[in-house]
Image (cartoon, grey):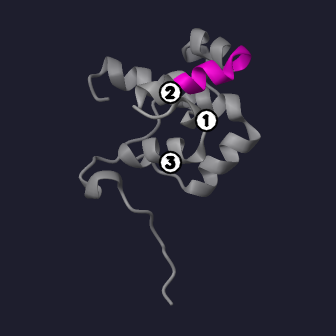
Amino acid sequence: MNPVVSQPRYGGGGTMASDWQTGECDCCNDLGICLCGTFFPLCLSCQIASDMDECCLCGASVAMRTKYRTKYGIPGSICSDFLWLMCFPQCALCQLKRDIEKRKAMNAF
């Protein structure tokens, strides 16, 4: 039995590799998102899900973060997505929303 050594890419591998637009703890890059994620994480989760045309309850899921990361070729793993969402859920949510907003501003979303 051969172990899986790499994750499949979204869209058949046709996406360019990139990285997160901001770090997990770069809250000062967008204070509005940071405050929303801190005090209203469910609202921020719904905004993320809406941006990605998914069900509102999916915004804070490992699957949503993994889907986004693989779509844009952002390095990482399902394990790292899980750990960030379990240990630092608000930071992970805010990072994802900041990234979405920055890609929208660059017309790359």
Please identify the residue farthest to the bottom as the structure is shown: 1
Q: Are marks 2 and 3 in contact (CB under 8 Å)?
A: no
Residue position marked by numbered label 2 in the rendering: 48
Instruction: State how far apart marks 2 and 1 are (Cα).
Output: 8 Å
Residue position marked by numbered label 3 in the rendering: 66
Residue position marked by numbered label 1 in the rendering: 60
Disc 1 crowd, CA 10 A, few/some/many (<14, 14-19, 20+): many
- 99 relative position to 37: left or right: left
Please identify the residue farthest to the top as the structure is shown: 32
Disc 2 crowd, CA 10 A, few/some/many (<14, 14-19, 20+): many
Under mark 2, the amino acid is: Ile
Q: Are marks 2 and 1 in contact (CB under 8 Å)?
A: yes
- 18 relative position to 77: left or right: left
Give how far across and how far down residue 11 sits, in percent: 28, 52
The mark nearer the N terminus, 2 or 1, is 2
Under mark 3, the amino acid is: Thr
